[in-house]
Amino acid sequence: MFVDQIGKFTLSRLEAAGRWTLFSGASLLHVRSGGALGSRLARSVFELGVRCIPVIAIVSAFAGLVLGLQGHYVLSRFGASGMLGTLVSLSLCRELGPVLAALMIAGQAGTALAAELGIQRSTEQIDAIELLDISPEGFLAGARLFASLLVFPSLTALFVIVGVAGGWLSGCVLLPQDPDAYWAAVHSALRGRDVFECLLKAAVFGLLTTSLCAYQGFNAHRSGEAGARAVGIATVRGIVLSSIAILAADYLITAALL
Amino acid sequence: MNPSTAPSEPPVLEIRRLRKGFAEREVLRDISFQVPTGSIVSILGRSGTGKSVLLKCVVGLLEADSGEMFYRGAPLAKSECRIALRRASSYVFQHNALFDSATVRENVLLPLQARGTGSPKEWDKNVRDVLARLELEDAAERYPAELSGGMQKRLAVARALVTQPELVFFDEPTAGLDPLRRNAVFAMISKLQRERGFTAVVVTHDVQEALVVSSRILWLDAGLVRFDGPAAEFETSDDAQICEFRDNIAALRTALRS
Ligand SMILES: Nc1ncnc2c1ncn2[C@@H]1O[C@H](COP(=O)(O)OP(=O)(O)O)[C@@H](O)[C@H]1O
Ligand SMILES: [Mg+2]
């Protein structure tokens, strides 16, 4: 009985994973379906990217401030306080920047996306699109997926830059670190492969977040609930699954690249 | 020339032994009927008998459990045939399914954009024509949520007619309209049929209006076709349920007397 349940659960998860893969593939493949691709791309970049700039700027500033502070105390204990720039820039670039930026964008834009598609599903707008012989996946999610490939790396870069500045502020202005040593350490620490890892992670997190949130909204009617409740569930599932996917992919990419 | 008189031509639609149920209960048990080219077929029946489900099965938004459907003699089970039906037809949803983030004009423009034939200039002209016909030209830049219920319904009809389809499925196109506009919608359907030989499948509760414009009436009850014949026969039918539905004023008088 119990084993039976586990089996059923596993199968249903596998089925959903397969559907998600097909959904993402169809979105990318049929992105032109329905026309007006340029304006859809521009709108997606605005909704996913431009709107998230304030929250990214604020969160990254505080992340940098905390890193500067913690780094100062920890490194001083070992007499290695000259390494503060290295610590701040590497941890932001390789880990915190991509992960935190993706989590923030998922929280702001991913939930909005899941809710929007969920409502379009529950009001039959997606059916109407399908009957116009437009691919609803491509028309509604395609441009967003492509936009995420631009938006996530850009916002992650912004996150890292503001964060490093935050580390400088707390370490060298509010605390007695040497600013020249800080910037020299930042310069010598960051290599091409660190930047590559940073941007690769950002792009992968972007695709995962956007496709998972879009998928949940798109399939809100499969959640077992209907109407407003189904939209709520889709939104929650979108953000929860995105967060898990971001952290899991982070581990896998890090392990693969080390 | 009335195309429906050509004996060799298959009907636009032929439905054979269609069955569709949902988890708990069977909705359509055994539905067969034909829609001849250039006809107006009205589907009547009490709420909840499965009229919307029937239309959705025909266009492929819902998957029938069993039965065969043919579009111009070709089986709709084949995807090319289903696509051909979608290209040639349009659908007015019972709850309108308007694109709520798009203006009235954009709602009507999308089907033309999706089709992609013709120039943007022609599209603009078509959009203006159809909006004028449905008295919506003053609302062109408003959003669906800002319209009254009747205007939303008319917008749904406008969106379905803008591509000049040869076959239109109307799911309660006059629900919530005042009597004058209700007449106008039926008159428009009838005029299009006479001028362009277009075919309409109309789900409606407006029995009197349907009797005036329809070539055929279908009466659905308990998942079966209880009546299928010319409007004149429906008018004189003495089936108790049909009488009650058809002569609702008389039925009300009787109910008040008793
Ligand atoms: N997606 C669905 N899932 C489960 N039941 C449904 C679904 N759609 C319709 N039904 C059921 O099918 C029956 C017929 O519905 P419908 O076709 O909307 O009736 P109507 O004739 O008023 O258009 C109703 O009892 C409804 O509850
Ligand atoms: Mg209905």
Image (spheres, coloured by chain):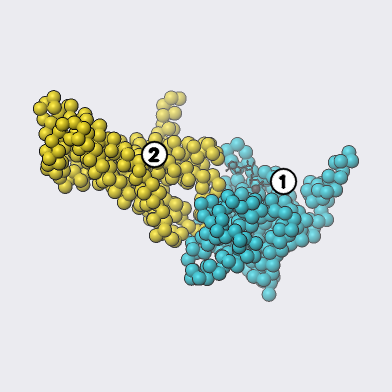
Chain colours: A yellow, B cyan
- Where is residue B201? Give x, y as percent: 66, 58
Position of the C terminus of chain B, as image quadrant, is top right
Q: Chain of mark 2?
A: A
- Observer-nearest of B209 and B99: B99
Position of the N terminus of chain B, as image quadrant, is bottom right
Residue furthest to the left? A79
Dot 2 crowding, Cα within 10 Å, few <14, some 14–19, many 20+? many
The residue shown at (83%, 49%) is B249
Residue picked out by circle 2:
A107
Residue picked out by circle 1:
B46
Residue furthest to the right? B257
The residue shown at (44%, 36%) is A236
The residue shown at (71%, 61%) is B184
Q: Quadrant of residue A163?
A: top left
Q: Chain of mark 1?
A: B
Residue type, numbered disc 1: Arg
- Where is residue A97? Give x, y as percent: 26, 40
Residue furthest to the bottom? B1
Position of residue B95 in the picture relative to residue B180 (left or right):
left
- Observer-nearest of B136 and A178: A178
Position of residue A218 in the picture relative to residue B143 (left or right):
left
Whether residue A224 is visible to the viewer of this picture, yes or no, is: yes
CA gap between label 2 and label 1 equals 45 Å
Check if mark 2 and mark 1 are on a common chain.
no
All told, the count of numbered labels is: 2
Label 1 near ligand 1 (CB < 8 Å): yes
Position of residue B1 in the picture relative to residue A159 (left or right):
right
Q: Quadrant of residue B7?
A: bottom right
Q: Quadrant of residue A40?
A: bottom left
Whether residue A249 is visible to the viewer of this picture, yes or no, is: no
